[in-house]
Amino acid sequence: MDSQMYCFGQNSVDVCLVATNAARLRLIAGPDKRLLEMGLRRAQGPDGGFTASIYSYLGGFNSSSNTLAGQLRGVPVAGTLAHSFVTSFSGSEVPPDPMLAPASSEGPTVDLAASVNLWLKRVCTYLGLEVQEPHPGERAAFVAYALALPRAFQGLLDSYSVRRSGLPNFLAVALALGELGYRAVGVRLDSGDLLQQAQEIRGIFRTVGAEFQVPWLESVPIAVSNNIDEKELARLAQKGSEVNIIGIGTSVVTCPKQPSMGCVYKLVSVGGQPRMKLTEDHEKQTLPGSKAAFRLLDSDGFFLMDLLQLAEEPPPKAGQELRVWPRGAQEPCTVKPAQVEPLLQLCLQQGQLCEPLPSLDESRTFAQQSLNHLNPAHKQLQSPRVYPVALSEKLQALVDSLGAGGPQAEPLEVVPEAETYIQTLTPASEAQHGNEVQPPTAGSENCSPQDVQEPGPERPYQVHSLVRGLLAQVPSLAEGRPRRAALRVLSALALEHAQDVVCALLPSSLPPDRAAAELWRSLSRNQRVNGQVLVQLLWALKGTTGPEPGALAATRALGEMLAVSGCVGATRGFYPHLLLALVTQLHELAQGVHSPESPKVWEPSHRGPPHSHASCTVEALKALLTGDGGRMVVTCMEQAGGWRRLVGAHTHLEGVLLLASAMVAHADHHLRGLFADLLPRLRSTNEPHRLTAMAFFTGLLQSRPTARLLREDVILERLRTWQCDPEPTVRWLGLLGLGHLAMNRGKIRHVNTLLPVLLRALGEGDARLVGAALGALRRLLLQPGAPVRLLSSELRPRLLPLLDDARDSVRASAVGLLGTLVRRGQRGLRLGLRGPLRKLVLQSLVPLLLRLHDSSQDAAESSEWTLARCDQALRWGLLEEMVTVAHYDSPEALSRVCHRLVQRYPSHVKHFLSQTQGYLRSPQDPLRRAATVLIGFLVYHASPSGVSQDLLDSLFQDLGQLQGDPESAVSAAAHVTAQQVALLARAQVRPHRPSLLRFIRQHSYPARPHPLYDDSPFLRRSRASQWNCPEPR
């Protein structure tokens, strides 16, 4: 009554109902049970959920899961793990920092993940379980949670299987934390018979606590939830239930007699890979993958059923005969809808409405029409017919396949029906294939080199026969128990004879075979055998080279297995080996390596061109990275064109470098193992192996922790040795490695070793080598304490020729290096120091101004950036003019630039003119015109006494030849500039006047007419055009 009086004071009857309902639930639970309100997702809107959280606390609940109610109204907040958090882990995740300090902060830190693995073996042994049975993804989630919140660790036990997964995983983590002085705060059950499970778990806590002498374990609180109403609450509150905390949602925030939508968001896909919640409560199992929904109508216009299918499936059509699986049915059925309506409609995208919302009247009309289409049998109040929802065959097959690989699947022992099935396989195989079945030997082309350890031909022959029988019969088996029994047979064989099973299956993987692909995927889903099979495939891949059939078949098999969600977790321990093997396989495919005995991959016996095999290898590599949490690596490679480079004959190593960079940025947990595996390959006699390892080694030097695995002097000496290699590619990789070393702070002390190597590379004929050396020098300059003066002196004679290099990439890089040099040395330039850097800048001014009109967009933009750095360092005040010249080729802006340069550096005018004269013979029309115009303005602003007659004669002669240039814009500009040269020459030969008049005349130039040039037809094209954007007007 008191609660109702308070609520009436709030002018709300609804909240009184919530508070009264909460008080009623508290009376049923009694004073000792803790009640947790968790009905936000069931409430009528967020405001309703907020109100319900407040008034359930008022009615007697201990706490709420609604954090907003805690923040604004002081309601105690509590909660547990989410199923989505647990299922988002695949088991391959490696914590970035697995070390955990003791609770007392005294003593060394401990690797929690390693400690958990040790405890898991002890717990599984005590509980009579195999170590492989607890789900590795669930365990990885628990470890991640424990590392983040060691003092508040709790377990959600029913994400997969309470007894065989959740409970042992929780115990392993809890006991590992207990060694460090932490105590778990509880566990939660969310499905099944909550009372019975709580009693069983409490019993296990007591026995395990006694076995391992951990007394606090038996008192760990047990929380339960899952549509708990008054009746179930009374059952859970009875004496001896062992339940400590009860979470209630729907029953407290809604009226129990009125319907409430039991909808929640569940994880169905991670990185494009279908995910399915597997639990012992089949009603809580989710449907995996991205889906589409359709409503099927019969010929009378009534709703027949709703059909769910995978998003990539073609939509059903009216009149089409469909084979579907109704939910809850054991067999499929066939329907032929008269009409089909799609149910999914995009309404919101990134928070924005995609179309106007209907009015209230429109919504009401739509609701009434929908009710009219509902069959009367579904609308009757007494015993209404259940409205059917069905799955497409493809979606049902996905559900079955993921369900078969879950922790609740039957053990791998061959059950009696499977034994009978095995007896029928060998005769069936022999009958179908006749004499084709031959026992594989150690020399078989599709077997790994390790086949020599087999004890004799009899066992492989039997396994081979069984596998061939499976290949023949699995396609004809119906979905369901018979098919699953056959797949269990294969798993049982692989558990004992993985090597023989792989050798038997590989010949059917090339060309691709649907039955073989299904068998590979079934092996991948079984956590007890997938690791063994993957190891055998790795050996098969490493035992052959390039496009040989064995390697191609192994690659395709790896692609099938790794594409199955959760399989990558089985590669722990040999992940770097597998990654390197796949990348090296791409190199060999790109080069077309093959032995004389093996047929070429484009012959009819191996369907498809070579690029299809490379594509398969790339997909396997993507699956390996994605399954290990490296989705960002895959994305970065796609955006940078890395996958396309990896399969190219001349760009493969560039792709390897991009892959290494992406892994350094987004997947650094495997770098140490990868780096260690690379070192012996650097001296391999196999060229693809050696070059791929060199490229990876070079790229991984970007990671400072990885590079520290070797001493700096050892790495430096190795890279210097590569510079003596006759192969330009090796020298290029060495220069890139030196550049990565220069990026790391502290390497500046090696400048005396780095600099001679880098400077010598500037004279190489290969553009890759020069570009790598320029990039390394730029990184060296960016380091604190870089020797700017030394670099200026050394680069001055070498950099100037590169500004006019015929190779676009070299020109752009050289100009960018000059800009970086000016930026780092601007302090000395501002102080007016006349050192080598100032001389280099003045000698580079003309090339920089003219390269604003370079045909290479990168060179032009790099020149603009470098001129801006020069303007800032030397305080010319010409930034606006230079930008205007760069983008609009404005003669007025160029005239102001030349005026300022002539004023600042009158003694350099002759050098400016001589340099510009050399560009009059450039093969690029824009450069010839730009040089002509620049000479015109320099001559116009120059003093008559500042330019020699010989230089003017030479300019006049060249300009005269240029007036006949086939490009009209060049010849017109040459005509105007020649007039300026002639006027300056006449000014030099005028008779001497009295000294005062001569002084005034010399300091009042120019008195000549200003040169007028037509607009340039060579305006630089904006990069906006590359994105189909209009040019600015």
Image (cartoon, helix red, strand yellow):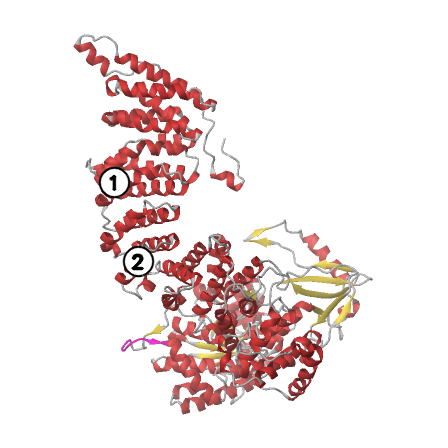
Q: Nearer the viewer, mark 2 or mark 1?
A: 2
> What SS does tag 1 mark?
helix
Magenta highlight on residue 108: yes
* Residue 826 badge: 1
Q: Is residue 584 magenta?
A: no
Label 2 close to label 1 by CB (< 8 Å): no
Instruction: Choose between 362 and 481: the one closer to the eye.
Output: 481
Q: Badge 2 local density, few (<14 within 10 Å), some, or many (20+)?
A: few
Magenta stretch bounds: 105-111
Dot 2 or dot 1, earlier in sequence: 2
**Amino acid on which the number 1 mark rests in the picture:** Gln
Measured as percent of width and height from the top left, residue 35 is found at 50, 77
Identity of the residue drawn at 42% across and 72% down: 144
Q: Badge 2 is on which residue?
A: 721
Residue 285 at least partly seen: no
Indicate whether 647 appears above or below 989: below
Per the picture, the main secondary structure of the magenta-coloured stretch is loop
